[in-house]
Image (cartoon, rainbow, N blue to C red):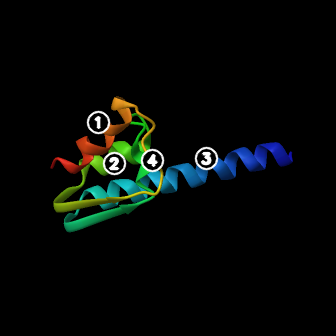
């Protein structure tokens, strides 16, 4: 019974998170700064997809994680900053 409750709670949190992301992308933002920007290096992650949909004048990525000589990771970060 506890496992079912945990699964239901996790699903509810996921739906809430997706709803919040949808609400964020509907607004126009003057500037967006993303701390822990290494989290958007995976272009297929929900956070990365939402971040690329943001309508902004300016974008700033902040990360302490170095790039590991990986052009795909660099492209994912620069792709966010190009808009």
Q: CA distance from mark 4 to mark 3?
A: 33 Å
Question: Residue tagged by mark 2?
Answer: 50
Mark toward the start of the polypeptide (2 vs 3)? 3
Mark toward the start of the polypeptide (4 vs 1)? 4
Q: CA distance from mark 4 to mark 2?
A: 23 Å
- Nearer the observer: mark 1 or 2; the answer is 1
Q: CA distance from mark 4 to mark 1?
A: 14 Å
**Few, some or many C-alpha atoms within 10 Å of disc 4 (few <14, some 14-19, many ≥20)?**
few
- Please give left or right for residue 7 compared with residue 18 in the image: right
Q: Residue 41 location, x and y as percent?
A: 40, 41
Numbered mark located on residue 75 in the image: 1
Going 25% across and 43% down the picture, which residue do you hit? 78
Mark toward the start of the polypeptide (4 vs 2)? 2
Q: Secondary structure at mark 2?
A: helix
Q: Secondary structure at mark 4?
A: loop
Q: Residue 59 location, x and y as percent?
A: 23, 59
Q: Count numbered badges in the picture.
A: 4
Q: Is residue 75 above or below residue 77?
A: above
Numbered mark located on residue 11 in the image: 3
In the picture as drawn, the residue positioned furthest to the right comes out as 1
Question: Residue tagged by mark 4?
Answer: 66
């Amino acid at each position: 019974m506890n496992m079912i409750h945990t699964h239901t709670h996790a699903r509810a949190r996921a739906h809430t998170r997706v709803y919040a992301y949808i609400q964020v992308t509907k607004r126009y933002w003057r500037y967006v700064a993303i701390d822990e920007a290494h989290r958007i290096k995976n272009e297929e992650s929900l956070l990365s997809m939402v971040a690329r949909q943001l309508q902004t004048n300016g974008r700033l990525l902040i990360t302490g994680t170095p790039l590991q000589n990986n052009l795909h990771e660099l492209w994912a970060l620069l792709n966010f900053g190009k808009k």
